Image (tube, rainbow, N blue to C red):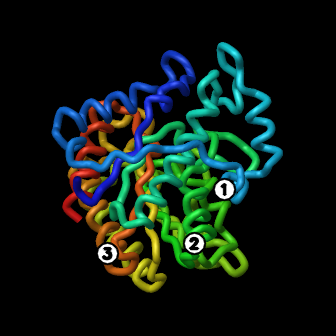
Amino acid sequence: MGNTGLIYDPRYLGHDMGVGHPESPNRLRAIMQQLEQSGTAARLARIEPREAEDEWVTQIHKPSYLAMLKSHVPANGRVSLDPDTLMSPGSLTAAYLAAGGALAAVDAIMSRRVSHVFCAVRPPGHHAEAGRAMGFCLLNNVAIAARYVQKKYGLKRVLIVDWDVHHGNGTQHSFEDDPSVLFFSTHQYPHYPGTGRESERGRGAGEGFTINVPMQAGEGDEEYHAVFQKSLMPAADAFKPEFVIISAGFDAHRDDPLASMGLTEEGYADLTRIVAGIAKRHAGGRMLSSLEGGYHLPALATSVDRHIQALLAA
């Protein structure tokens, strides 16, 4: 086994928002098939997720929101939570397993079983607000994991790097007044959900600990590399994170149907190496990566594979 772990559970496939919805169970099927065929899967330590405990979920989400989710689970069919986000009978279990997969990944990293973990989970999380589902997301997996790192293990400074093509509004709002979490986001702008202006820098004690870098349609590997070198690295080196989390969306790929960016699989590997370097310098290599978006199945699968191969080489 290498120094990289993988979180996956077939129950993630039980979240099904219907035929034609881009956030489909086929996303994880494509990823897992690619990892098996390339041989990457055999190099990974498999880590079992658990359902996240409400003790940790409520560090980010309101208890009233969780009660609403639990009361809305359909016995069959689907219920709509927002125009883009639906629940099927297996959705809430999948969501708790997605958040709990991130917690299990933290445990594996902190126990030194592995240095880094890729969480092949769904539903994604970074749009989920304290009291609201949105943008395909039910529970904010990375935000819950960040608080868990701090509260359970006593680490003080956590860096969250969100390279999904859509701005992680829920994650930003979770920590915007908190100087113990540095949130860095690149995203196509203007684009859903409409947040993520450069002027959004946090507030109160957290001012300056939110860094948004809006990207223009068509920008790709070269532009992203420059942004990570010029904006992320100096900020991260000054912050000195003790744990690093990636909101790993792969929808800024040039083939993705929901956006207009130009990243390639090798571009994602390059960004991975940059972030892994930050983790190595400051966090003992500790890094968790959790799947967010990515809707062109071949591009998603190969990008995840290259991302994980870069982790294995870190």
Q: Residues within 10 Å of mark 2 (few under 14, many from 20)?
A: many
Q: Amino acid at mark 3?
A: Lys
In the rendered image, which residue does mark 2 sit on? 181
| Residue 81 x %, y % | 71, 31
Task: Give the CA separation, mark 3 to mark 2.
Answer: 18 Å
Q: In the displayed image of the protein, which residue is found farthest to the left?
A: 38
Instruction: Tell me, yes or no, whether the two marked residues, 2 and 1, touch with CB atoms within 8 Å.
Output: no
Residue closer to the observer: 4 or 278: 4
Residue drawn at x 27%, y 58% is 311
Q: Quadrant of residue 15?
A: top right
In the rendered image, which residue does mark 3 sit on? 280
Residue drawn at x 48%, y 82% is 239
Q: Amino acid at mark 1?
A: Trp
Task: Give the CA separation, mark 1 to mark 3.
Answer: 27 Å
Is residue 26 something that shows in the picture?
yes
Residue closer to the observer: 159 or 51: 51
| Residue 115 x %, y % | 33, 64
Q: Residues within 10 Å of mark 3 (few under 14, many from 20)?
A: some
Instruction: Identify the element where label 1 is drawn.
Output: helix
Instruction: Give the mark nearest the N terminus, 3 or 2.
Output: 2
Instruction: Give the mark nearest the N terminus, 1 or 3.
Output: 1
In the rendered image, which residue does mark 1 sit on? 56
Disc marking residue 192: none
Task: Give the CA separation, mark 2 to mark 1.
Answer: 17 Å
Q: Amino acid at mark 2?
A: Val
Quarter holding the C terminus is bottom left
> In the figure, is residue 226 to the left or right of 196?
left
Is residue 249 something that shows in the picture?
no
Q: How many marks?
A: 3
Instruction: Tell me, yes or no, whether the two marked residues, 3 and 2, touch with CB atoms within 8 Å.
Output: no
Instruction: Identify the element where label 3 is drawn.
Output: helix
Residue closer to the observer: 198 or 292: 292
